[in-house]
Image (cartoon, rainbow, N blue to C red):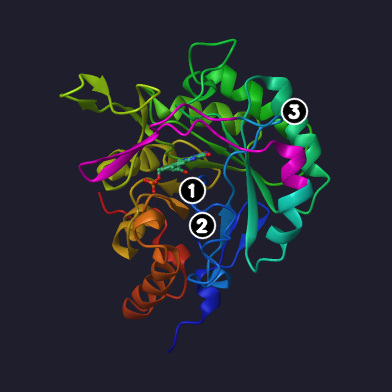
Amino acid sequence: MGVKESTLSVGIGKLKLKSPVIAASGTFGYGEEYRELVSLSSIGGIVTKSISLKAYEGNKPPRIWETTAGMLNSIGLQNEGVGAFIESKLSDLKRLPTAVIVSIAGDQKDEFRELAKRLDKTSIDAIEINISCPNIKHKSKSRLFSQDPDATAEIVRAVRRNTKKPLITKLSPNVTDITEIAKAAERAGTDAISLINTVIGMAVDIDTKRPRLGNVTGGLSGPCIKPIALRMVWEVYNAVKVPVIGMGGIMNTEDAIEFFLCGASAIQVGTANFINPRATTEVVAGLREYLKKNKLTSIKDLIGKLKI
Ligand SMILES: Cc1cc2nc3c(=O)[nH]c(=O)nc-3n(C[C@H](O)[C@H](O)[C@H](O)COP(=O)(O)O)c2cc1C
């Protein structure tokens, strides 16, 4: 019996995706550079670069450094602001044959609330709340929102009250107990949890004795963080009822399958896009083959099926 394409479809709350492979925030632009290379209709969705209320300039250069099996970035959420995004980018994005998930970021609760209100009136498919970027310092706090369960709940609640769009809350791995934060987001009304954002890291130039990044520290991504991401996806999958979207170092189909087995209902591909712009579609094709080879009728048959 052949496996039909529909077997890759998954539901993330109300959000129906034709495939569980999503392009991660900050690594895929608005899909514009990838359109020629990637079959966008085969992937589940694109998460935009995080968008704030007002434009952000980002951090001072250098902002990228390649590490052993990964990369450090300190871009700092450079973006044009939600008004310009809605006016100049959204209609083009919505013509793409895939779901548009808009990532939002802000300095305080009111900003998140306002972003939710503005985006609720648009045709986007879902919102991903980024409370986990290690490259911006919140005016009011020395910690990231997602390093504190109460702050996490406060932001999720503020967004939830102002939009009916499906909500995904993106968590930081830079915490002691990720389940505590995930449970707080669930209680506050998120429809799904995505993880992980980047791991805070550093690199040093021994000749100049300076940090490699203008911002001193940055976010580590790529294959080197995959074991951390898998562990956290597994922990969160066992702690909450809402679906989990896994990411962190997924370079190919095998990596993606590890995440499904650890409990991810969908996965995001980030850093891999810089190395292989076709990574997302190749993972989709690989998953189809894997299902066929293993005579599975749905990707859902893999979710959380880790044998302990
Ligand atoms: C250059 C770069 C920019 C990023 N920008 C964002 C961003 O704007 N918002 C966000 O939530 N995550 C951002 N991320 C984090 C990724 O979406 C992803 O969570 C992380 O890189 C781990 O996945 P990966 O190892 O597959 O890249 C960025 C990552 C990179 C490498």
In this picture, is 26 found above or below 186? below
Residue at point 47%, 21% (across, down)? 147
At label 1, counting other C-alpha atoms closer than 10 Å, the crowd grade (few under 14, some 14-19, many 20 or more) is many
Q: Which residues are magenta?
A: 57-86
Q: Earlier in the sequence, mark 3 or mark 1?
A: 3
Q: Quadrant of ligand 1?
A: top left
At label 3, counting other C-alpha atoms closer than 10 Å, the crowd grade (few under 14, some 14-19, many 20 or more) is many
Q: In the orientation shown, which residue stands out farthest toward the left?
A: 206
The quarter of the picture where the N terminus appears is bottom left
Give the spatial CA distance, label 2 vs label 1.
9 Å
Residue 180 position, x and y percent, is 46, 25
Circle 1 sits on which residue?
245
Q: Is the residue indicated by label 3 positioned so its CB lies within 8 Å of ligand 1? A: no
Circle 3 sits on which residue?
113
Choose top left, top right, bottom left or bottom right for residue 211.
top left
Residue at point 72%, 34% (across, down)? 160
Residue at point 79%, 33% (across, down)? 162
- Does the CB distance between marks 2 and 1 fall below 8 Å? yes
For badge 3, the amino acid type reads Arg
Give the spatial CA distance, label 3 vs label 1.
23 Å
Circle 2 sits on which residue?
22
Q: In the orientation shown, which residue stands out farthest toward the bottom?
A: 1
Q: Earlier in the sequence, mark 2 or mark 1?
A: 2
For badge 2, the amino acid type reads Ile
